[in-house]
Each structure stands twice: as structure tokens, then as C-alpha cells.
Image (spheres, rainbow, N blue to C red):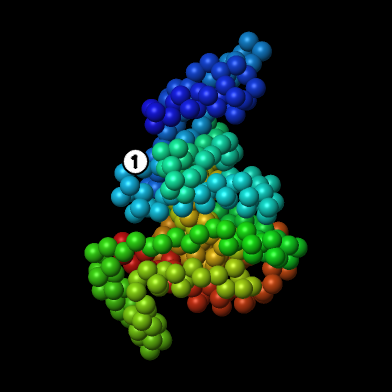
Amino acid sequence: MEQHLDRIAELAKNGTFGTGKFLQVIPNPDCSAGPQFASQLGFLAVDLEEDSNIVRKSIVVKIQPKEQAERDLQCSDNQFFVELTMYREVLPFLGALEMDVFPEFIYGEASRGADPDNDIVIMADLSGQGYIISPDIYLDADTFKLTLRRLGEFHGYSYRAKRSRPSETQTLGQKLPHKRFQMDDSEDMSRPIWDRGFNAAKKQCDSSQLLDKVRAKMDTYRTDELWGVFRKPKEPFAAFIHGDFNRNNLLFKYVDDKAVNVKFLDFQASIYSDPSVDLAFFLYMNSTQETRDNHWEDFFKTYWEGVVSIEPKPGFSYDEFLKHFASRALYGYLPRSEE
């Protein structure tokens, strides 16, 4: 990150962070770093002088991993391009910025592999506003409902855009490349783990034949192909999705230990895909079985309320949405089964 300080100083002198006179850029002493895996992060503070007052702009800076092998593993050349496309084009096109669940986008460059050392994304640091990553590995029901409501709204903007500007929506959706899943030696380990999960499920339900049929169908795909099947967009349900909607990409503001607001981070995995990807991954990876058993129906109703608050006629009914989700829910089960 050190090598980028001069670059950020030049941006500050050119007014990227405000109209004041540039004073300095330093590591932010008040930052709180969270887990990020596809890029290197720096939490910095840019000091400007305005009307004899010092104004501090707290920022988060993402740069590419230094090693080519790591960039290839993370597909980070595409991920930087995707995140910049989301902030510069997709979110403004959808009108979703009015949701106020995204950090302020300040500056970015993405070369798609031509000059990865120059790739950079600069966002506002929300920690000074009281936002933090949840201290709990599994979220409570109220935090889930808060987040699902906003997730439903986010997807709702895609349905609104498809109704008003269908051709432009499809064109923009094609601009976001789908992630290539990198397979390694762990590929051979996935299927025995899935067997363990399916065998446990068969003991708890009366649909063992159906489960056997599903499990056999899974074996007709390579693991990377299977992920692609679940992510393939199907109309009328398709929408722009976050793509990695997980606890580590969410920030919450708490009052008296209760989450009262949420922000969505890191759109490097976003694509035009199936909203069930976001929903299933979030539900299974961030809740306990007890929470899901007690609040399953409420969770889906809360999400749906978010969708129709933005687009009352998304192109399908609530029952159709539930049936479709059931066909894609394994997207959340598969990674959870490997924990």
C-alpha cells in the first residue's frame, strides 16, 4: 500500500476528495479492518485544509494482490472491473443508490489484466459512522430481517428496470463477466461431504427418493459446472445480484446491541444472475438451524416485502418465487455442507 500513497496524494491535490488544500495522507488510526480475500486493503486518512479548518476524509483503498498466481486464483482482474462497473454504471442505472446501503464510491481504475499494479478502488470508510462487521458468526433473527428487507429492495430495482428499460437492462447485464470457479485437489473431497449432508437429511424427512434423485443429478456435473447451473439467470426471476452476500461483506450499525442499519460492501462478484444465489448463500451461511426452523417463513415474507416495495409487479407471484427458490436452494447448502 505504501507505493500508492503518492498516487492518492496527487488525487487529493486534484480535488478527488474535496476542494480543500491537500495536507497529508496517512494510515487511519481509527480504522477497523474486516476480512477481505480478493484484494489488499488499506485504511487511510486524507487531511485537507478548508477555511483554516482541517477536514479528514477516511477512505478504504483496494489494490490488486501482488502475485500473478493469487490474482489468477481470485480472478481479481475481472473482480476489479466488475466492482467499478457496478458503482459507475449498474447502480446508477437501476436508481439503487437512493437506497443508501452502499459506501460512497470515490475513485477507481481497472485494467482487466493489462496493468494490475495500477488497479485501484477507493471508497469511503464507514467505520467512523459507527458501522462494524457483526461480532457474531451467526446473525440473530432481527438482524436477518433487517438485511433481507434491504436485499429484497436491491433486487427489486432490477425488476423495475426490466419493466421500464428491458433492452438496456439486458445489455448492461451482459457486461458483467461470470466468475470462473477454480477447481483444485479439494474437488474430490466435495462429493463425500455432500453425501454426508444428504444422508443426514434423509433421516429427517420422508423424501429420501427425491433426495437420491437430486444427489444423482449432481453427479452428472463437474463441481464448477454445478455452481454455474445455479447461477445461470432464468427469467423472469433474474436480476443484478451481489454475488457474495455474506456476513463479511456487510456492515451494521448497532444501538443498544441491536442492529438498526446495514451497508452492503464489495461488489466484486456481482453478475446478472439468479437472486436465489444471494438469498440461499446468506440464509445458510449466516444462520443456525434453529433460527431457520423458527423464522423461515418470516424471512421470505420480509424479503418479498422489500422486492414489491420497489417494484409491485416484478413479473411473478410470491408463490412462484418460493417454488423457484426451492429449485436453487442447494446453492446455499453446498458451501455450508463443507464447513
Residue at 52% across, 29% down: 58
Name the amino acid type tagged 1.
Answer: Lys
The picture quadrant where one finds residue 133 is top left
Residue at 58% across, 50% down: 86
Q: Is residue 242 above or below residue 12?
A: below
Q: Can residue 176 be seen in this view?
A: yes
The picture quadrant where one finds residue 286 is bottom left
Residue occupied by mark 1: 66
Residue at 57% across, 21% down: 13
Give the residue at the far right of this rendering.
164
At which x and y percent is residue 87?
A: 59, 46
The picture quadrant where one finds residue 155 is bottom right
Residue at 66% across, 13% down: 51
At which x and y percent is residue 107?
A: 56, 36
| Nearer to me, 188 or 324 | 188
On-image quarter of the C terminus:
bottom left
Q: Is residue 259 visible?
A: no
